[in-house]
Image: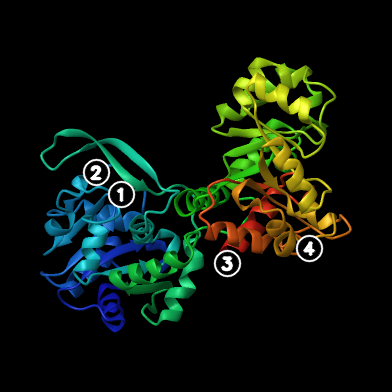
């Protein structure tokens, strides 16, 4: 290859005088080039003309073509920490001007969006979408919840050392390669060859607009599906957690039995699922109330140290008397809420309330009318378990919910499913009418608790439950 041939190929792709181009490149991908990297840079600059501009990213080691342009006389460098570019040509100053003053490093008032606003291009020369920094602009413009703040020192245009802080900075792993097909299918991206290198050329505005459309439909559009990719698992969890926090009135909790056998395992699984509240029921397959107070306090501290709060403690039987671990003031102080079966528990309930517990009640194998009668006698709030109502032979939404008149007393819904014969089932695959119950409570702007795996065995992992629950939300 030589400069003349490269210029012809660039023109064939549609580049012309006055255009601006952000170039991501690999010189070695071209094969042998007469004149080396300078010939490639000159080919671009001569194709673009004196009013055109060639831009390259300069953060990190990004190849010899980048180094060649940024060291050219007259090259203008943007100033910030983490997303710098260098530019040469008629719009270099305009594109790079006070990059560090922008609120973000890839969003509005940065070289990346200015390029799009002025009709510029992104060119991938012998590299794939994984090197396409403008895709970070899409993430930033969407203000995706997994993006973090970024700070660092840099030198401004006058040589003064400054410390800056910017919002929505991208994290580690992305599946930008998987986005290539959307750009190909759009017809907006031109693909050709220069030497051995595959070249992709697309208007920066088209690139951003297509990315924004994808991201608005699926906020995880840039993340991979590999369950063993810790980065993307974590970032998906942050998307889900933000969805519940920002779009829903209810509070989402997971039972400890579903989250993990031990606190440490549960913490990992809760973080991967994007859930920051846990209900204590079983530890190491032992009922929570059979453990010593110090074991409970240790577990609560482990959760708290990782930013996970405890929503309460559930007992599956009512103790004969109010003593043991549940009577410990330190346990009451940190757990606060006790969930017990609707049974002959008057004396225990009175003792628990007197000691400072907030006591709620869940149905086991009662019908709705029996459960409602017990609830009225105890003057309590209802934790509605639809799988247990199904096990009692009722249709939980069509009959139990209305027959028991629980609408005014329900404080929590157990997100579980089951068959009439008591067999546990995946969400929406049993007789618990869980989809209908979630829907009607959301229609009432329910501000109570939804507990994944609460009060019943779930036939799968916490991540299975979360995905099935998210599917319910997506389809109501």
* C-alpha distance separating marks 1 and 2: 7 Å
Q: Is residue 164 left or right of residue 281?
A: left
* C-alpha distance separating marks 4 and 2: 58 Å
Residue at label 4?
Answer: 431
Local packing at callout 4 (Cα closer than 10 Å; few below 14, some 14-19, many 20+) is many
**Label 3's element?**
loop
Which residue is nearer to you in this view: 100 or 60? 100
**Label 2's element?**
loop
Which residue is nearer to you in this view: 362 or 10? 362
Quadrant hosting residue 36? bottom left
Local packing at callout 3 (Cα closer than 10 Å; few below 14, some 14-19, many 20+) is few
Residue at label 2?
Answer: 80
Q: Position of residue 428 (x, y in %)?
A: 72, 63
* C-alpha distance separating marks 3 and 1: 41 Å
> In front of the other: label 2 or label 3?
3
Q: Position of residue 90 (x, y in %)?
A: 11, 64
* C-alpha distance separating marks 4 and 1: 54 Å
Q: Is residue 169 left or right of residue 374?
A: left
Quadrant hosting residue 433? bottom right
> In front of the other: label 3 or label 1?
3
Residue at label 1?
Answer: 83
**Label 4's element?**
loop
**Label 1's element?**
loop
Look at 73% across and 32% down and name the residue there. 262
Is residue 396 at least partly visible in the picture? yes
> In front of the other: label 4 or label 2?
4
């Amino acid at each position: 290859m030589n400069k003349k041939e490269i210029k012809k190929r660039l023109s064939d792709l549609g580049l012309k005088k006055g255009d601006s181009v952000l170039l991501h490149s690999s010189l070695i991908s071209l094969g042998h080039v007469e004149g080396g990297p300078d010939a490639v840079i000159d080919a671009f600059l001569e194709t673009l003309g004196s009013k055109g501009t060639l831009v390259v990213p300069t953060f990190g080691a990004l190849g010899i073509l980048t180094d060649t342009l940024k060291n050219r006389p007259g090259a203008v460098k943007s100033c910030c920490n983490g997303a710098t570019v260098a530019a040469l040509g008629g719009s270099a100053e305009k594109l790079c001007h006070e990059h560090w003053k922008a609120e973000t490093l890839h969003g509005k008032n940065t070289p990346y969006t200015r390029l799009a606003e002025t009709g510029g291009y992104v060119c991938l020369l012998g590299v794939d979408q994984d090197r396409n920094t403008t895709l970070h602009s899409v993430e930033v413009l969407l203000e995706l919840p997994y993006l973090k703040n970024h700070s660092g020192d840099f030198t401004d245009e006058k040589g003064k050392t400054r410390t800056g802080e910017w919002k929505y900075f991208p994290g580690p792993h992305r599946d930008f390669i998987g986005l290539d097909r959307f750009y190909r299918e759009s017809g907006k991206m031109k693909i050709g060859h220069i030497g051995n290198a595959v070249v992709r050329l697309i208007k920066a505005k088209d690139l951003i607009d297509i990315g924004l459309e994808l991201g608005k439909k699926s906020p995880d559009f840039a993340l991979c599906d590999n369950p063993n990719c810790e980065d993307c698992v974590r970032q998906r969890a942050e998307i889900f957690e933000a969805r519940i926090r920002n779009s829903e009135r209810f509070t989402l909790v997971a039972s400890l039995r579903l989250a993990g056998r031990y606190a440490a395992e549960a913490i990992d699984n809760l973080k991967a699922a994007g859930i920051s509240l846990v209900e204590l029921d079983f530890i190491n397959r032992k009922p929570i109330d059979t453990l010593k107070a110090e074991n409970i306090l240790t577990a609560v501290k482990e959760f708290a140290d990782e930013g996970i709060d405890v929503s309460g403690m559930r007992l599956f039987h009512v103790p004969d008397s109010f003593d043991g671990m549940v009577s410990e003031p330190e346990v009451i102080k940190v757990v606060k809420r006790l969930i017990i079966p609707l049974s002959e528990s008057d004396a225990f309930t009175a003792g628990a309330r007197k000691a400072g517990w907030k006591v709620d009640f869940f149905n086991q194998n009662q019908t709705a009318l029996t459960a409602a009668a017990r609830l009225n006698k105890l003057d309590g709030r209802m934790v509605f378990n639809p799988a247990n109502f199904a096990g009692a032979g009722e249709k939980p939404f069509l009959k139990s919910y209305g027959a028991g008149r629980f609408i005014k007393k329900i404080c929590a819904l157990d997100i579980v499913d089951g068959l009439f014969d008591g067999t546990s089932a995946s969400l929406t695959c049993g007789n618990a009418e869980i989809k209908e119950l979630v829907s009607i409570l959301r229609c009432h702007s329910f501000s109570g608790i939804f507990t994944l795996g609460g009060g019943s065995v779930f036939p799968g992992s916490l991540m299975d439950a979360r995905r099935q629950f998210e599917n319910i939300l997506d389809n109501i």
